[in-house]
């Protein structure tokens, strides 16, 4: 599943004082808010972004398993790069000792919704989607869409 997306845009600068909510040099709240608005319009039920030390989490209401999007600036691009990722990134998650839930349909639908939001915004460029495994291989090579 493609669950990691990197892109560039100057449309999401940090808020003044944002690094007081997360670590210095980290930001991404505007990207998280952009996704919240767009996903609501697409019928999803995202909750308000939650700060973490590395960026922002957008929880998505989902009864079967925890579903969320992580958003933050991305050092691969020193000026205007961002990375967002969907969790879970695995096709199945364990609920109990011998019980697993298939995540593919729900995660893929969310990925397609996010992709549509990013593609529809003319201020977003150089978008690349990766699987979790592709993203974590170094050095990464671009994946064709």
Image (cartoon, rainbow, N blue to C red):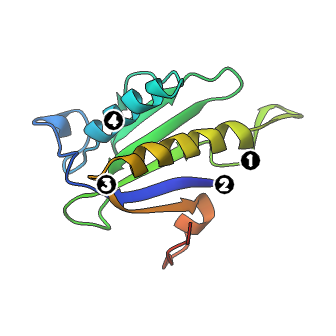
- Judge from the rendering whether residue 13 lies leftward or rightward of residue 70; answer left or right: left
Read off the residue under disc 4.
34
Answer whether residue 14 is visible to the viewer in this image: yes
Answer whether residue 52 is visible to the viewer in this image: no
Read off the residue under disc 3.
124
Nearer the camera: disc 1 or disc 4: 4
Secondary structure beneath dot 1 equals: loop
Whole-percent x and y of residue 44? 53, 25
Residue 6 in which image quadrant: bottom left
Q: Is residue 63 above or below residue 34?
A: above
Find the distance from the CA under tag 1 to the CA under tag 3.
28 Å
Whole-percent x and y of residue 136? 54, 66
Quadrant where the N terminus sits is bottom right
Secondary structure beneath dot 3 equals: loop
Nearer the camera: disc 3 or disc 2: 3
Label 2 vs 1, first from the N-terminus: 2
Residue 87 in which image quadrant: top right
Label 1 vs 3, first from the N-terminus: 1
Label 3 vs 2, first from the N-terminus: 2
Mark 4: give few (<14), some (14-19) or many (20+) Cα within 10 Å: some
Instruction: Residue at 15% x, 37% y: name it.
Output: 15
Mark 2 and mark 4 residues within 8 Å of each other at the beta carbon: no
Read off the residue under disc 2.
1
Read off the residue under disc 1.
91
């Amino acid at each position: 599943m493609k669950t990691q997306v990197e892109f560039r845009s100057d449309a999401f600068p940090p808020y003044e004082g944002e690094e007081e909510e997360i670590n210095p040099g980290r930001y991404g709240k505007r990207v998280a808010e952009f996704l919240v608005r767009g996903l609501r319009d697409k019928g999803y039920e995202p909750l308000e972004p939650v700060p973490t030390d590395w960026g922002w989490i957008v929880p998505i209401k989902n009864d079967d398993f925890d579903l969320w999007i992580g958003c933050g600036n991305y050092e691969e691009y020193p000026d205007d790069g961002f990375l967002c990722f969907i969790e879970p990134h695995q096709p199945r998650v364990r609920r109990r000792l011998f019980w697993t839930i298939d995540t593919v349909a729900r995660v893929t639908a969310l990925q397609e919704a996010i992709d549509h939001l990013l593609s529809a915004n003319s201020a977003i460029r150089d978008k690349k989607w990766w699987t979790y495994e592709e993203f974590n291989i170094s050095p990464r090579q671009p994946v064709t869409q």
